[in-house]
């Protein structure tokens, strides 16, 4: 039951709005590690606040997370999975979609710095793009999008 007067509720809401505006301003200027820290800060107090406050901060947290989401950089075309990749994903209880989403948004995974630069260039110029990731069971996967963007293949390096 809420025992606050309307004036108190308005003041509380104004305070929450001020807090979220301040945090949003910090978040927009922050690098990836600082953004993670801000999300963790919100998570740290969610268990000790009221239901209404929790709802407010969960919505705000989602707003912050959407700022992290990069736009889709290119089309995947037809998505193909090799037998080895399919088995590795099943064994790790994962789907190709989580790796495809990273790939399509420019998270190139565990490739070297030169390959990351090459991928950034390839997105702009229309060349082939290769990302590399590890499944939860530590199996390395490659995701390759063809230069004409007609298809993307998820495969094990040994299947190349």
Image: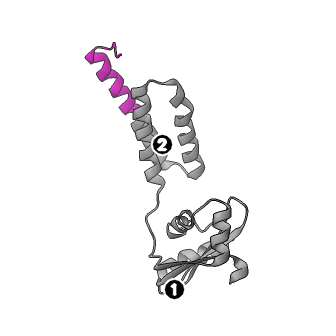
Residue 54 visible in the displayed image:
yes
**Nearest the eye: 41 or 143:** 143
Q: Quadrant of residue 134?
A: bottom right
The vertical placement of 67 against 150, above or below, is above
The C terminus sits in image quarter: bottom right
Q: Position of residue 19 (x, y in %)?
A: 42, 32
- The boundaries of the magenta stretch are 1-19
**Nearest the eye: 141 or 107:** 141
CB atoms of marks 2 and 1 within 8 Å: no
Q: Which mark is residue 42?
A: none
The vertical placement of 9 against 136, above or below, is above
In-image side of 18 versus 126 (left or right): left
Residue 110 visible in the displayed image:
no
Label 1, residues with CA under 10 Å away: few <14, some 14-19, many ≥20: some
What element does badge 2 sit on? Answer: helix
Residue at position x 57%, y 39% from top?
Answer: 40
Q: Position of residue 73 (x, y in %)?
A: 46, 71
Q: Position of residue 118 (x, y in %)?
A: 60, 78
Q: Which circle's residue, 2 or 1, is located before the other in the chain?
A: 2
What element does badge 1 sit on? Answer: loop
**Is residue 59 found inside the magenta-colored segment of the image?**
no
Q: Work out how far the residue at label 2 is from the one at label 1, CA to CA, in angstroms.
A: 38 Å
Q: Position of residue 9 (x, y in %)?
A: 31, 20
The N terminus sits in image quarter: top left
Disc 2 designates what residue? Answer: 26
Q: Which mark is residue 147?
A: 1
Main SS type for the magenta part?
Answer: helix
């Amino acid at each position: 039951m809420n025992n606050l007067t309307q004036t108190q509720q308005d003041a509380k809401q104004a305070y929450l709005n001020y807090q979220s505006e301040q945090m949003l301003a910090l978040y927009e200027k922050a690098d990836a590690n600082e953004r993670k820290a801000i999300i963790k800060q919100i998570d740290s107090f969610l268990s000790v606040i009221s239901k209404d406050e929790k709802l407010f901060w969960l919505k705000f947290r989602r707003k912050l997370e959407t700022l992290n989401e990069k736009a889709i950089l290119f089309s995947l075309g037809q998505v193909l999975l090799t037998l080895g990749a399919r088995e590795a994903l099943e064994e790790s209880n994962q789907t190709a979609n989580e790796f495809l989403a990273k790939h399509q948004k420019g998270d190139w995974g565990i490739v070297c710095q030169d390959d990351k630069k090459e991928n950034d260039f390839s997105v702009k110029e229309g060349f082939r793009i290769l990302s590399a990731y590890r499944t939860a069971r530590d199996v390395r996967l490659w995701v390759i999008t063809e230069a004409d963007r007609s298809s993307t293949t998820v495969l094990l390096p040994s299947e190349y």
